[in-house]
Image: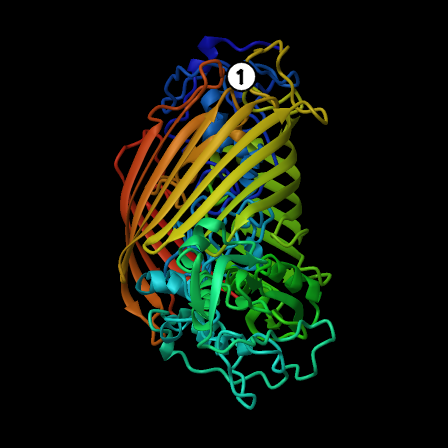
Amino acid sequence: MVPTTQKSEEAVSTKDKLKRDRLNGESVNHQPSVVKPSTSQSAKVKPSNLKPSTPQSANVKPLNPKPSNLKPSNVRPSGIEASILVPIQWQATLLRPVNFQTSIFDSIVIQPRIFGSPTFSRSVFYPTPLNRTTQPTSLLQPTLLQPQPPQIVNLQTSLIQPREVKPGNLQAANLQPSLIQPAVLKPENLQAANLQASLIQPAALRPSNRQAFNPQQFAQIIPQNSPPSTSSPTNSGETPANPPTFPPSSTQQQTQENPETINPIAPDTTQNTETPSPSTPPSPTISPSSSETIAVEQIEVIGSTILDQDELNPILQPLEGRTVTLEELRGVADAISQLYLDRGFITSRAVLVEPISSGVVKVQVIEGSLQEIQVEGTRRLNPNYVRSRIRLGAKVPLNTAALEDQLRLLRIDPLFENVEASLRAGTELGQSILVVRVSEADPFDGSVGIDNYSPPSVGSERMTGNVSYRNLTGLGDQISLGYNRTTVGGAETWDLSYLIPINAKNGTIQLRASRNRNEVIVEEFRELDIRGESELYEINYRQPFIRTPREELALSLGFTFQDGQTFTFAGPTPFGIGPDEEGVSRTSVFKFGQDYTRRDVSGAWAFRSLFSFGTGLFNATENSESEIDENAPDGQFISWLAQIQRVQVLNPDNFLIIQADLQLGLDGLLPAQQFVIGGGQSVRGYRQNVRAGDNGFRISIEDRITLERDEAGVATFLLAPFLDVGYVWNRGNNPNLLQDKTFIAGLGLGLLWEPVPNLNLRLDYGLPLVELDDRGTNAQDEGFYFSVNYNF
């Protein structure tokens, strides 16, 4: 090894030749855009060590030449030398990581923390159904999020994904099932009534029927031949009321402020009319006449699991210690039934226990329950998938609000086109049978697109595609394949993932594998044949603990193994300080994530936290005893990524999207773990991944203004003025140098257009507010970004 001298390094400069950028697929876990899976993990490029013994090409200059176009540079040498090359004056900046975006050789293309459970970077829930596919710079696009095909898993999927979420977005860790119907998120629909739209409109819940308890309200949920309530006699020949029915999805968008406007639902003609089983309790018949008085010392309520004595006392105490009429005692039972009814327990009621005599009067509460859940309409899906989820809302006593929540969650499940449900009488008093009718969605899903969201060093224009197949085995699982390639062939990525739900709360396990290849196509460096390869393998478990249509809280735990290597014409070559002498970067990372989403009448919140713990498992890169620098970044590190997003509806045609990301590292990081800013999906006005560091933050504010809607009221043309800012910095002991001006900001305007359903176009122009010395001439450097995506 022949050490380079400071003098030799200063002999060459590439400020005018090389424009710094990042490789294709190199995305950051916190970038609000589609992340490109790449697995390589190379270190920062510092080819101050490449020293051919003889001029290998026209680009290799002999020792000491000083071309007029080369100016001295004060960038310090990397200190890494290739023994097969003889010293020559290649300036370190020529191959600095920032120039090729180490990711070329590093799996920066595959940002580990991004793959970890739900990362909600650039995609945020989108109040209007305009984008059925992920728009590059869009922040929240709930119902329409469509992954950039090649980034199946690290695709920054929105935390709020409505039923329209395409399989490509169902990446285990990233999948954030949206809990609100897309239509409900429309600005004009973000009314409290829409968010709470009842799926059940039983007569008992209508205002006119809530004044006093009426036993006829329960005729629809108890056997037709079961005894009527003692609180009010009924004619034996009276026809039971229609059973409460969960209307189809379309009715979910109706406002519930006036339930009387809901079209009546025909009775379920399949109701059970058989005689109840012998175990059915006999109808309590009260012998005393209504005018007879009874001396009441105490009233005892039996069978209630939800009402405490403090709630019952206002009803019971006025009659205790008095002589009352039978009608007054019936009023007690009716009042208790009304308490249940007011809380949504429409199948529960209270009755007086016979015989009624002076002294202690007993009131029996019959708490409603589900006797059976019948699932109809499934073809390939196991009915237990539906049944197990409904049971989460079918506790005793049966509550319609809890039941409706589970039905709403099923409706937004991408496995279903539609879900309906109805209650019919059971064979036992107080029991009901729930019939759920489902319509399975098409299992195939996919998208194709083209954009310029790739680093110019490997080709800025890229083609993307992805295809998914849901319910592969009948268990609700999904397999997805993604592929992307730059138009000049400088980068290519394959990504395969498999996700399977393991419990009724949508706990999921995801397996993922990705392979990435990159090659620098910048003309000045073609002779060096700089390229990189990487692989990634990941397993992730995500478990929601709170899951309703209004909020979700989930934790995730995963493990990611990445192995990457970089090469030049001379063979395996390390770039920067970090990889070993063969150019290999290897990490084994445990990730612990927490995410929370909350929807309200004027928008939604999304919070995400991810801790990454690099370990020495599986021969991960180790530099603690390195002869070059013991502080060199390696595979053992700790970092934290925090993200927050807010969608705020200003008026029916205008909503605001705000997003902020922050990363802090306790150690110097390899490029694949660093925070990256710049590009159409991060800070617009600059080329993709123009700056990277161990720590950083990014803030983006975008205003969506609807200019045109289609006949269905869906926004099809929008203006999107925006402001993006970002800043990165390194740990003090990181030997790799940062470029000048690590704070950048851009101001601009975006256009979003959906000319036909499923075809989404976006064009952005960003004006840089901070001028960089290494600004290039690519369209990205001029601030222009485009994306065309079609979902099928």
Q: Is residue 158 visible?
A: no
Give 280 or 255, whichever is nearer the viewer. 280
Q: Is residue 507 left or right of residue 730?
A: right
In this orientation, which residue lies closer to the viewer: 66 or 110?
A: 110
361, above or below 633, in the image: below
Residue to which mark 1 is pinned:
88
Q: Position of residue 42 (x, y in %)?
A: 58, 29
**Residue displayed at 56% across by 78% down:** 228
- Up the image or down, 466 lies above or below 263; here it is above
Q: Nearer the viewer, residue 104 or 490?
A: 104
Give residue 790's position: percent from left, percent from top: 48, 64
Q: Position of residue 459 (x, y in %)?
A: 49, 45
Q: Quadrant of the N terminus?
A: top right
Q: Residue at x 57, y 39 (%)?
A: 110
Q: Pointer 1: residues within 10 angstroms few (<14), some, or many (20+)? A: many
Q: How many marks?
A: 1
How far across and how far down the image is residue 538, in percent? 66, 40
For this view, does 420 lie left or right of residue 325?
right
Residue at 38% from the left image edge and 16% from the top image edge: 72
Position of 351 with respect to 617 (left or right) is: left
Residue type, numbered disc 1: Ile
Quadrant in the rendering for residue 13: top left
Residue 544 appears in the figure: yes
Colouring chosen for the image of the structure: rainbow
Dot 1 lies on which element?
loop
Q: Quadrant of residue 377?
A: bottom right
| Of 613 and 403, the residue lying toward us | 403
Quarter of the image for the C terminus: give it.
bottom right
- Determine the image quadrant of residue 32: top left
